[in-house]
Amino acid sequence: MGSFEASEETVKFLCERLLDKTQPISERFRALFSLRNLRGELPRDALILATRDPSNLLAHEAAFALGQMQDAEAIPALESVLNDLCLHPIVRHEAAEALG
């Protein structure tokens, strides 16, 4: 998956949009799909936080996006998701897939 450059302001906006539970889920998914194509700490950390979202589908997609990013810094968070028995199995499964 390719990456693209975005301004710091845009990255912050996308991270905030993803994590804002008052936003429509469709807007949060748009932010997620944009963030997966970015590199760096802010996009990675927002996606990591999203793996714990109450929406299992969003959390699942966040784990998938982290796997697509292939960012070694995300490995401990993905391992934590995988081992958290309180999370939905689909989220944990996607974390396992992301880890390879």
Image: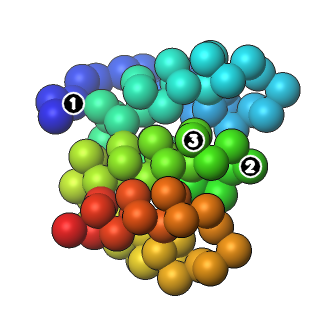
In the image shown, does 67 or 92 lie closer to the viewer? 92
Q: In this view, does 19 lie above or below 30?
A: below
Do the CB atoms of the residues marked 3 and 2 lie less than 8 Å apart? no
Report the amino acid beneath label 2: Pro
Per the image, label 1 sits on a secondary structure element best described as loop
Disc 2 or disc 1, which is closer to the eye? Answer: 2
Q: In this view, does 46 lie above or below 51?
A: above
Do the CB atoms of the residues marked 1 and 3 lie less than 8 Å apart? no
- Tag 2 residue: 54
Task: Point out residue 44 in the picture as x, y percentages from the top left corner.
Answer: 44, 50
Q: Residue 3 carries which label?
A: 1
Q: Residue 59 carries which label?
A: none
- Tag 3 residue: 57
Report the amino acid beneath label 3: Leu
Res. 47 visible in picture: no
Q: Which of marks 2 and 1 is nearer the N terminus?
A: 1
Looking at the image, the residue that sits furthest to the right is 22
Q: Which of marks 1 and 3 is nearer the N terminus?
A: 1
What's the residue at 61%, 62% (across, down)? 88
Residue 57 located left or right of residue 38: right
Report the amino acid beneath label 1: Ser
